[in-house]
Image: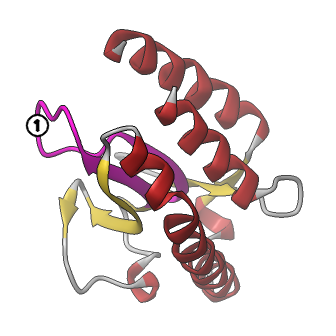
């Protein structure tokens, strides 16, 4: 079951990179982009609160207690509790929607994530990938991920 989920998310991630994200070159990373990232993260935060309430009981009925959906932010893989979108233009900043629940846990990682913004620093030049709200339905993408976790 876990191997099936892992393969699903690997394949889903590759397809999403092709369809769901805007590539951002380093010279396009500016204050306007910072504003867009902040707005995307605020929208995502609102959606996660609604979906967490909606799906908590459904997950509990399957023995998957304490569903949690949140915006997880890190810089170079280090989660920092008080980090906000204000830091999104720092190289290696990443924000994603994380989904976790109490169940079979093999480590402290969460079960699923949908990336919102990632600023890859690179050795000489950086670039970023931004979830494209204009072409995609974030709420639907989160719900599809939740439904997959329920299978």
- 66 inside magenta stretch: no
On the rendered structure, is 64 left or right of 43?
A: left
Q: Residue at x 18, y 32 (%)?
A: 104
- Looking at the picture, how far across and down is residue 51, in whole percent? 58, 65
| Residue 119 seen in this snapshot | no
Q: Residue at x 45, y 76 (%)?
A: 88
Q: Is residue 111 above or below residue 142?
A: above
Magenta stretch, residue numbers: 96-117
Tell me which corner region of the image, top left, top right, bottom left or bottom right, holds residue 138: bottom right
**Quadrant of the image containing the N terminus:** top left
Q: Is residue 40 above or below residue 25?
A: below
Tell me which corner region of the image, top left, top right, bottom left or bottom right, holds residue 86: bottom left
Q: Is residue 49 above or below residue 18?
A: below
| Farthest left residue in view | 107
SS at mark 1?
loop
Q: Can you identify the residue that label 1 sits on?
A: 107
Q: Residue at x 69, y 26 (%)?
A: 15
- Looking at the picture, how far across and down is residue 115, in whole percent? 52, 52
């Amino acid at each position: 079951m876990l191997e099936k989920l892992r393969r699903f998310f690997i394949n889903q991630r590759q397809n999403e990179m092709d369809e769901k994200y805007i590539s951002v070159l380093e010279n396009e990373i500016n204050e306007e982009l910072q504003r867009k990232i902040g707005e995307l993260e605020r929208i995502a935060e609102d959606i996660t609160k609604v979906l967490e309430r909606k799906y908590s009981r459904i997950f509990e009925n399957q023995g998957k207690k304490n569903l949690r959906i949140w915006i997880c932010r890190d810089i170079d893989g280090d989660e920092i509790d008080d980090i906000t979108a204000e830091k999104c233009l720092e190289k290696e900043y990443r924000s994603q929607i994380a989904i976790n629940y109490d169940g079979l846990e093999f480590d402290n990682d969460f079960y699923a994530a949908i990336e919102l913004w990632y600023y890859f620093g690179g050795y000489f030049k950086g670039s970023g990938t931004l979830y494209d709200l204009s072409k995609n339905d974030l709420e639907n993408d989160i719900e599809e991920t939740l439904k997959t976790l329920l299978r």
